[in-house]
Image: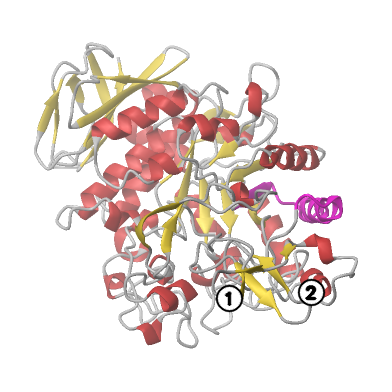
Amino acid sequence: MLSLKRLGLGCLVGVMGMGALGAIRAAASGAANGSGEATETKVSGAAMLMPAGADGHDSWWRHAVIYEIYPRSFQDSNGDGIGDINGITSRLDYLKDLGVDAIWITPMYPSPGVDYGYDISDYTAIDPEYGTMADFDHMVAEAKTRGIRVIMDYVINHTSDQNAWFKESRSSRDNPKRDWYVWKDGKVGADGKLGPPNNWQSWFGHSAWTYDETTKQYYYHYFYMQQPDLNWHNPEVRKAMYGVLQFWMKHGVAGFRIDAVSRLFEDPEMRDDPYLAGYNAYGDRNIQHKYTDDLPEVHDVLREVRSVVDAFPGDPVLVTEADEPNVAELTKMYGVDGKNDEVQLPMDFQIADVNELSAVKFRKLFNEVESNTAKGQPEYFFSNHDQRRQWDRYGDGVHNDQIAKLMAALLLTTRGTPQMYYGEEIGMRTTDPARIEDVHDPIGKLGWPKEKGRDGERTPMQWDSGKYAGFTTGGTPWLPIPPSAVKYNVAVESQDQDSIYNTYKRLLALRRSEPALRDGSYEAIDESNEHVFSYVRKSAGETIVVALNMSAQPRTVDLKAAGAKGDVLYRSPLGKGGLAAETVSLGRVELEPFGFVVVKVQ
């Protein structure tokens, strides 16, 4: 839904003497059993222990790297131009080799497709467009053998208007499911005409109320009119929706990403939202969603959701689309009063939406979330299916590839659970439709040309340089293959040591092999530097320092606060030395424009 704005692998025994390249190779060849229990695996002759934690339990999601898949666009297995479940299964070896631990798959439930799966007509089935329940169970089983967990999308706020629940609800005012949705009488305006109950707006433009001729009332929808909001005050709604969680947990999923969670409740007094200056892309007056966002009852539901999934084994995880206005509000998603009984991983939109390379801004925000009062695990990302791709948002038009590598380091070397978006690892870019006739996303049709929709960030995955980039061998893909796919694809980039793809792959391997990067503490250093964001990661006597040059000029930084000298684990760009071993004095570390370095302190 549109936003408002590793398994634990433990200490790699013997790696310390192998050098950076050896550590990378060893980590890249490792495997996990997917159970969350402590296991020992042989890696290049060394024993790799996956610890259970100091208290006998170490949650897998604290060390995991999550990879978001938009199923329509990942891999088509049957030649119809639409990605599917069997396509995902066919690419699990790729995901294992890349180094991710969990995949979050956006909705695959039956849906009319108004919002491409976020309008659900049946929560406990698979849309035939994507396959069958047997295909899904097979995918989960195959993922497990590769140490990859599956996270489902839980669309909690609304259903499709084609959902059987809503069909019953709108059939009559006295239907037993009438109160499963939000229905209100209209209000007569100054012009004497009947209108909506108040001025609440849909996030996708115009009034959030739609008049239903059959029962002569309005129903509420925060998003499209085809997405009526559920009434979460109704205990029967809660019971049914918690049954959805139980259904998928029994099918082996490892948790849920909860969509649009802050919109669950509305002001019972139905007060108008305050108007703000200006107009949006749809021609509406801007408003503050004061009475339809972040009402305190949201936390009651999150506690209940947590209790439902906690009844299942495997330490299931909850991730929320928590686009909160600041870290203080984000912190509440872990659980009010520091109880940590709600969500383990609220997505941090504050950091995702900096939208400029600013060492000052990133340092401030990382420091804030690091010191959150709940001591909750941070969850970071820079791209998803509702955002223009980071290659465009952070690139300067000249150094986009190097900046993409820099952002990979920022994502994968800080403390927290990182989340990637498919194609991010090859530098996929946003490719908007050229004409309104080519637009699929309804908001693009409604807001064109100011709002071109979200098709541009949802184009098919680019596997090779073939006609359809390896996405399909059959008919025309549902969205066009971008021209950039000839150069930016897995096959081409895997042959280039210094590609975006190999940068991600090495950083993911380092994260697995180096306890300080996986589990260590975080502390910013050189905090007065306006151009370079530097920080230290520490774990069990090991110290790693990371320096990220967020400027277009070469920079030399003094990092001796972390130690006297160190061994370079990775430097970008590679330069003449390539991946050769390198020792540096931390009092004088040289960085190329938009370059970065990861150093293990001696």
Asked if the residue under mark 2 is in contact with the one under mark 1, i.e. CB atoms within 8 Å, the reply is no
Seen from the viewer's position, the closer of residues 62 and 492 is: 62
Q: Is residue 393 above or below residue 311?
A: below
Q: In which quarter of the image is residue 335?
A: top right
| Residue mark closest to the camera, 1 vs 2 | 2
Name the residue at 79% across, 77% down: 215
Q: Mark 2 Cα within 10 Å, few/some/many (few <14, many 20+)? A: many
Image coordinates for residue 106, horizontal then vertical, percent: 58, 61
Which element type, helix, strand or loop, lies under badge 2? Answer: loop
Q: Which residue carries the number 1 mark?
A: 114
Front residue of 16/147: it is 147
Q: Is residue 16 positioned above or below 254 on the image?
A: above
In this view, 570 is above or below 204:
above
Q: Quadrant of the N terminus?
A: bottom right
Residue 145 in view in this figure: no
Q: Give amino acid for label 1.
A: Val
Q: Does the magenta stretch include residue 439?
A: no
Q: Give the range drawn in magenta.
A: 232-259
**Which amino acid type corresponds to the residue marked 2 in the rendered image?**
Arg
- Residue 38 shows which numbered tag? none
Any mark on residue 170, and which? 2
Give the crowd class for mark 1: few <14, some 14-19, many >=20 residues within 10 Å.
Answer: some
